[in-house]
Amino acid sequence: PRVNSPPPRPDLPIYTRDEVAEHCDQDSLWYTFRGAVYDLTPFYEGHPGGAPRLLMAAGQDLEPYWEVYRQHLRGHVVDWMEGYRIGSLTEEEAKAASNSFTFGDAYENEPIRDPNLLPCTQKPFNGEPRLDLLTNDYLTPNELFYVRNHLPVPDIDPKKYRLIVKGVGLKKHKFTLDDLKTKFKKHEVITTLQCAGNRREDLHNEGMREFLAPHWVVGAISTAKWGGVKIRDVLKECGLDVDAMALGELEIPGLDHVQFEAYDHDETGVHFGGSVRIAKVVDGLGDAILAYEMNDVPLPRDHGYPVRVILPGHAGCRQAKWIHKIILSDKESDKCWQQKSYRHFAPDINFEKDLAHWPPKRLDQAPISQIMPVQSIICNPPQNTILGGKNTNAITLKGVAWSGGGREIQRVDVSIDGGKTWTAAELYKPIKQRWNCHWAWTQFYKTIELPHEIKEKLKRGEHVRLDLVSKALNSDFNVQPERMEPYWNSRGIAINHWYHVNTILDPKQETGSVQHDGTKIEFGGNTPSGGKFA
């Protein structure tokens, strides 16, 4: 049978395409896919991509849409939809439905990407760098910096760019790109960005399935130097007394949040957006900026050209690219990316049972992602490699560590036996950052002497399997958990359990030799913890 094809259901009634087409509003949402008919009306508010997109496709066949958004074709999505199936089309009607129209591709004008940027999804493009490249430089080269796009990449004429600032406590202002570059002092900050869903694939298996895309593997983390203007300076120009607010001397009723709305939008006209607390942007040491440079050059299109938000210490999803509007408000953003996509639910809450029919009963128990937990990842040796073990006395590990909220990485412990024994790694951070403003990652390295018993096995010609792992400790003495199960969550965010790297020492290969072990390469070499996909 064809992959992702719904099973035959002779027990269900046969419908015509015309009958399906009549159910095309939010009171009754029917769809077809490869001959199956579904009633997804209860799912209207539960769609992670937003209700308007579900309404856009109502009464039609899903295949033309999914030919663009192919992340729906991971198998478990179609399996889940079977619970909403109400009937079938005839074979003739099913063929006609899948070819009934062509869905316009909003992604035809996308930037060209580096081949070492491994795509989790193509439309929208979401790509992570090969993990073994992350420790080659302290600042990630622009072409290797992970790309998280929620929507098609806009192509913005810098001469027509406008930033609109409005809301509680100030008068509405508009700024051009030239205004931002000439009216305000330039400010630079080096900070690490990590997608809130980095390592989501670690949480996806037969027993616990993740329905939110993209399924990042491990590399949605990168570091760059950003140049632009402080958001607080722009707000000050608009009449807000940011100094008094930062010092706690002024509290403006109804001013609690800063909403960001971007230029990028979906096919229904919904623009990307999110929000943070006002305290972050008025803080004189918060380094929140409107960036127009990345590593000393203008922002690449994939990273928000001509202007994006940078909020050091926060999850990547809060740092809107292609920023168009800044809105001061008493409320959080009402966008689905704020209210639905990046909430951290308890381990017993899952998509099929609890989240498909939105809202769930206890949203108060599902905090919205803002600050990320402490993280470390061994990047070298790469996953599933055979290392030269001939006359080898030691093995060298390299990786990256980072903590959200500006917390400093104060130690990284490493192990070659899966965490039975540990030793502290050497830390490398060539820049100085203030207390609680450690926005940028710390790289680590360690050459570990092989235990006597391993050396003896190598002398006897035996292959030795190593389980390399790290755990970072931040300045709040928070440390990475060993296992993911107690922290599993249905949105797949804030994932930071130990990342295991599988390697083998080969007694016949010379010291320094590194080669792949023959395991099937499914994603350019990046894999979930332990070296295998579920």
Image (cartoon, rainbow, N blue to C red):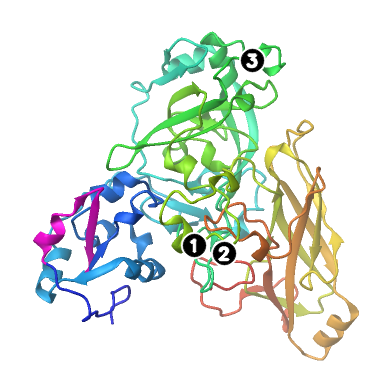
Q: Earlier in the sequence, mark 3 or mark 1?
A: 1
Q: For mark 3, what is the residue?
A: 251
Outermost residue toward the bottom in this view = 460
Say if mark 2 contacts mark 1, CB within 8 Å.
yes
Circle 2 residue? 203
Residue 440, compared with residue 60, is above or below; it is: above
Query: Residue furthest toward the right?
Result: 452
Disc 2 from disc 1: Cα separation? 7 Å
Identify whether 159 is placed above or below 414.
Answer: above
Q: Is residue 211 left or right of residue 185?
A: left
Say which amino acid is labelled 3: Glu
Q: Secondary structure at mark 2?
A: helix
Q: Amino acid at mark 2?
A: Leu
- Residue 314 image offset from top left, x and y in percent: 61, 38
Query: Image quadrant of residue 217?
Result: bottom right
Foreground: disc 3 or disc 1: 3
Q: Residue at x 66, y 15 (%)?
A: 245
Q: Is residue 230 visible?
A: no
